[in-house]
Image (spheres, rainbow, N blue to C red):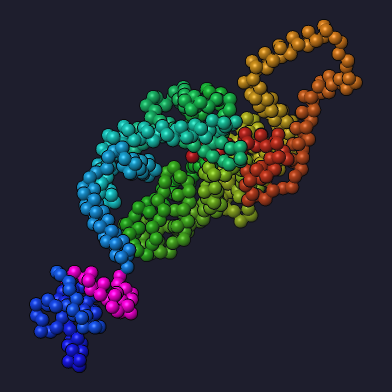
Amino acid sequence: MAEGETERLQLVKKTGATSIIWNWFGFKPSDEQQKEILCRVCGATVLAKSGNTTNLFYHLKAKHAIEYQECQAMQPKPSSSRKNAGRKQELIQSSIQQSFSKGTPYNRNSPRWIEITRAITVYLCKDMVPFQTVERRGFKSMIRAIDPRYEVPSRKYVTETEMPKLYAELREKVEKELCDLKYFATTTDLWSSRTMEPFLSLTIHYITDDWNLGSRCLQTSYFPAEHTAEEIAQGLKEALESWGFKEERQVCITTDNGTNVVKAASLNDWTRLQCFGHRLHLAIEDCEFLFPLLEKKKSIEESPGRAQSSLTSAHHRNTYKWGSRQMMIQRVLGQEKALSQVLKADRKTRHLVPTWQDTDVLESISKTLGPLLEFTDALSGEQYVSVSYIKPVLHLFNNTVLAPADDDTELTKDMKRVILEYLNEKYSDPETVDLLDMASLVDPRFKDAYIADDRKDFMKTRAVAEIQSLLEVQAATVTEPHTSTEAAADGAAAAEVAVESQSKRVKRSLGSFFKKASDGTAALADRKAIEVELKSYLQTMQVDGETDPLDWWRLYQANFPRVARLAQKYLCIPMVAT
């Protein structure tokens, strides 16, 4: 028995076996052919052909229950193994499909190809990239790295198919957005590209019913015609008509001071506001006595000394932007010592060393232009109300910014005087004054604070009359679609009354005798209500200068509904033509 027990302990596993069952079965070491399978627990011989383990599991289950339970606990779960096998098969199939699909380009009707093509088209428009970009090797290589299955379309396809399609979609969206505008203002500009191709642009500015200020560039169209006032006037008219805008709803057009553009607005009989930024630039340019000195400073800027590392690069002078001149002057004054050392080091530039007289002149100029430079960034805003600022800004210029000071040099005083005289003259014509006074009147930050005392009553009377006119136009617009229906209804009602009056006499009530008198005073009552509302609006507390007037009107529109209509009409006008 001891000998048999020793043999069982010395049993060896089946060669190459992987099943867990062989932990309880094996072969004698002397059985090199491994033909007789023995149980390690009881030593019994178990028959199993060709390595089949079914009989082994059955023997363990029938004869040794405890060992069988241990075997089952060690056995991997069949569901998990099948799941892993299925997942492995899916991965194999997926990798095969991917390897084939990588070489297959997208169909041009597939959602993915359409999505990428639209993204490229928007990129070309948004960043103003040349259409030729889609044919360049670097761009194609980048797209291929992002998505190898996408084939970049040709330039012809982009320009003749995708661009018109995108334009049509955006135009339809803008038309839906602007179809219900009550009033709007416009700006226009006539310019030439780098290749000297002329273009005429038109931008619309408006305030929505929920008091948001918006602007849309309707078109920048090729304008090969002669730039005469007549051609420009016709071009602007056609632009508005093509978008379905009525001229009577245009409050004002803001332009630069080109003679042909000014005359074009006059030919169309459009109210025009001159660009404040352009006027300010021309007012400063009117100081012609500055030019010789500025030319000398330009020579300093272009001298070899600019290459010295001890100097920060000076701002380049731009012939058409006075702000760049002022920044150049500030830089020269700030680096006066370093600049003098660099210029003195070279005999060719020694004559450019600023003298004390030059420095005094530059300081006088900087004292005048420095404060004005702070206004330039604020002038060209399209995201906030600006037209109502013109009268307050002119008042600020006259009383603070450009007012003569005791320590001013004669040059500074002369510059301030020239600039003020120019601006005051250009904004003194009656039509412009009326427009600016009305804009400031409906701005809750200013109201009538910057309206001349002898004009306040006149502007209030005009505001009341215009509000009444706006309400009448609105009433006519609302009732117009129903005119034919109402006429038919009135005819039927009149026939019924005639028949009824013949059949019996209707007894009148006491209140009916007073109804006619009440109707006769309706128009007078409406005007009185407008006057009371305007007076109440003007008596409200002064609003802080940093407050957005559109936010204020959004809150108080219900309190002053009639005045709000006037504010919505005038506050959309931009003060600059950008």
442 or 206: nearer the viewer: 206
> Residue 253: x and y, percent?
54, 32
201 or 191: nearer the viewer: 201
Number of marks in picture: 0
At 18% from the left and 79% from the top, the residue drawn is 45
Magenta stretch holds residue 92: no
Left or right placement of residue 56 versus residue 413 in this view: left
Q: Residue 61, relative to residue 393: is it above or below?
A: below
At 62% from the left and 30% from the top, the residue drawn is 431
35 or 183: nearer the viewer: 35
Left or right placement of residue 453 versus residue 118 in this view: right
Left or right placement of residue 147 versus residue 30 in this view: right
Q: Residue 125, relative to residue 370: is it above or below?
A: above
429 or 479: nearer the viewer: 479
> Residue 167: x and y, percent?
40, 34
At 39% from the left and 28% from the top, the residue drawn is 223
Left or right placement of residue 52 versus residue 133 in this view: left
Image quadrant where residue 481 sits: top right
Q: Determine the residue located farthest toward the right in the rendered image.
A: 510
Residue 557 appears anywhere in the view: yes
> Residue 109: x and y, percent?
31, 37
Q: Residue 32, relative to residue 539: is it above or below?
A: below
Q: Give the range drawn in magenta.
A: 51-76
Say which quadrant the N terminus sits in. Answer: bottom left
Image quadrant where residue 319 sits: top left
Residue 257 appears anywhere in the view: no
Q: Determine the residue located farthest toward the bottom in the rendered image.
A: 2
